[in-house]
């Protein structure tokens, strides 16, 4: 039995019919060259017939304020095998994911589902896995994925994905606790020690809000078409891009890959809003989740967030990139001065009003940010499932009332995998964002091709002055 954390409670509290709070992934596999006609059927049967017992977090069920072990686990409530009408195009697959991701899960059972989908063009099949955000964050979900697949095409396993045990961790040396010491007392002491430092950082933020143009507060986000109540209808779009193209740009422009990804997303969002005649005059603000994991765990939530100025009001890609850099670096520098515990306490104070508004909707015209852009590091080497190679993996995240768009990215085997989720009724033709992302990458490639590295550095310096 495990006590729900504050973040777990937040994700559970946010959930309602039009606002499911689960995250997921779409995994696209290519059948082995010598695969029999019933390869997928046999894969499904192996998992159904396995006597392996689900492990955490897949056997956990809500019990008031705790995660408890489910004593009535029924696989049929979580595992589905379906086939698309032939020919099963990617369009039909994404439509299916859009529909399933909009459906709530039963809280009386462990909060996850696994769908095996066959009949996809190109001799492929897919797995769609969704799990409640209260059980796992993005980094944890990625680790669960890597744990369940193999790096060898020869490896074969009949153990279902929800029952694969992680390798044993080295046991830390036991340190004798002082008499009278308890975990709760230790936690209280840590919080008490952290308070003065956290309050100093909060005060510093208030000073930055007044004098630092690169500081992004919860008061900076403009109203836009993204910031409306959402319906229960979803639209999911996905695409892969050659990651080496971004590395080539990154080598010439003095920025991190995360900064470049935000700049590309910003430019694509700007183009989409212009196409909808809805570009705000003020720059859009993105909420960027940040992992605080310092271990190899894969369950629970260990995240905070930063706010990034996307500079969507600026039509120049280089200037926009530089503004994004400065706003992100401002938050990074602040977090570098704090421990994970202090960061969580600081975030709880600074973003408390925004969190309360997300839960209650009491101030519908107040939005702390316009959308979520998340970048989760993924596996770098090819992965296999009983000989079937993983071709692509696309993250599927959440949208909220007031934030009708979520862009989540990950990397896999030299590709940038982009998953876009939006409210279908609020944001029309959201799939066009994929084309705008390609256009934005091309813009940066053209800039790099026309300017030598030294000239680009000078341009960046000019843009920051």
Image: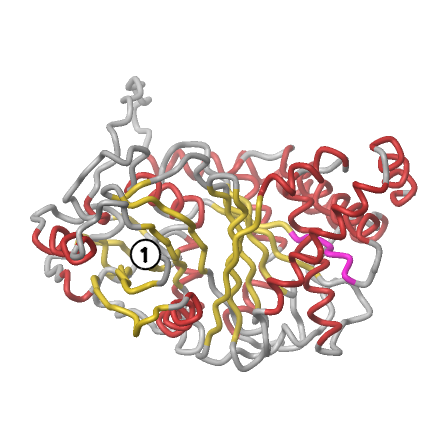
Q: Quadrant location of the C terminus?
A: top right
Residue drawn at point x = 68 percent, y = 53 percent: 264
Whether residue 382 sits left or right of residue 213 in the image: it is: left
Q: Farthest residue toward the front? A: 34
Q: Residue at x 58, y 40 (%)?
A: 195
Q: Mark 1 points at which residue?
A: 123
**Magenta segment boundaries in residue numbering:** 307-312
Q: Which color scheme is applied?
A: secondary structure
* Residue 233: quarter of image: bottom left
Q: In this view, does 57 lie to the left or right of 41?
A: right
Asked whether residue 421 is in view, the answer is yes
Near-viewer residue (20 or 44): 44
Label 1 environment density (alpha carbons within 10 Å; few <14, some 14–19, many ≥20): few
Q: Does the magenta stretch include residue 308?
A: yes
Decide which of 230, 26 is in the foreground and name it. 26
Say whether residue 159 is magenta. no
């Amino acid at each position: 039995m495990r006590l729900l954390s504050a973040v777990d409670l937040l994700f559970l509290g946010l959930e309602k019919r039009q606002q499911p709070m689960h995250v997921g992934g779409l995994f696209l596999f290519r059948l082995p060259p010598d695969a029999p006609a019933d390869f997928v059927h046999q894969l499904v049967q192996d998992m159904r017939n396995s006597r392996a017992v689900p492990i955490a977090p897949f056997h956990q069920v809500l019990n008031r304020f705790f995660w408890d072990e489910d004593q009535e686990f029924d696989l049929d409530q979580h595992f589905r095998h379906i086939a698309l009408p032939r020919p099963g195009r990617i369009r039909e697959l994404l439509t299916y994911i859009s529909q399933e991701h909009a459906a709530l899960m039963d809280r009386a059972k462990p909060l996850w589902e696994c769908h095996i989908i066959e009949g996809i063009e190109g001799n492929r099949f897919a797995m769609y896995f969704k799990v409640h955000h209260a059980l796992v964050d993005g980094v944890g979900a990625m680790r669960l994925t890597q744990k369940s697949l193999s790096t060898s095409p020869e490896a074969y396993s009949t153990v279902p994905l929800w029952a694969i045990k992680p390798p044993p961790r080295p046991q830390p040396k036991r340190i004798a606790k002082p008499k009278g010491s308890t975990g709760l007392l230790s936690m209280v002491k840590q919080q008490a020690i952290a308070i003065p430092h956290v309050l100093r950082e909060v005060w510093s933020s208030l000073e930055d809000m007044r004098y630092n143009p690169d500081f992004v507060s919860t008061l900076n986000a403009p109203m836009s078409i993204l910031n409306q109540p959402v319906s229960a209808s979803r639209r999911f779009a996905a695409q892969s891009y050659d990651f080496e193209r971004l590395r080539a740009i990154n080598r010439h422009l003095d920025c991190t890959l995360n900064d470049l990804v935000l700049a590309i997303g910003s430019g694509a969002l700007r183009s989409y809003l212009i196409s909808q005649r809805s570009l705000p005059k003020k720059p859009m603000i993105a909420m960027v989740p940040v992992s605080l994991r310092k271990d190899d765990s894969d369950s629970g939530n260990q995240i905070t967030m930063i706010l990034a100025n996307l500079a969507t009001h600026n039509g120049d890609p280089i200037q926009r990139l530089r503004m994004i850099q400065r706003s992100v670096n401002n938050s990074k520098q602040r977090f570098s001065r704090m421990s994970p515990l202090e960061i969580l306490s600081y975030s709880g104070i600074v973003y408390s009003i925004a969190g309360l508004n997300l839960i209650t909707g009491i101030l519908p015209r107040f939005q702390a940010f316009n959308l979520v852009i998340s970048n989760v590091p993924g596996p770098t080497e090819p992965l296999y499932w009983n000989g079937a190679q993983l071709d692509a993996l696309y993250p599927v995240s959440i949208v909220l009332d007031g934030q009708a768009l979520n862009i989540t990215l990950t990397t896999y085997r030299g590709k940038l995998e982009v998953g876009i989720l939006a409210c279908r009724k609020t944001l029309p033709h959201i799939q066009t964002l994929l084309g705008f992302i390609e256009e934005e990458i091309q813009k940066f490639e053209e800039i790099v091709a026309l300017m030598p590295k030294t000239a680009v550095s000078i341009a960046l310096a000019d843009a920051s002055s």
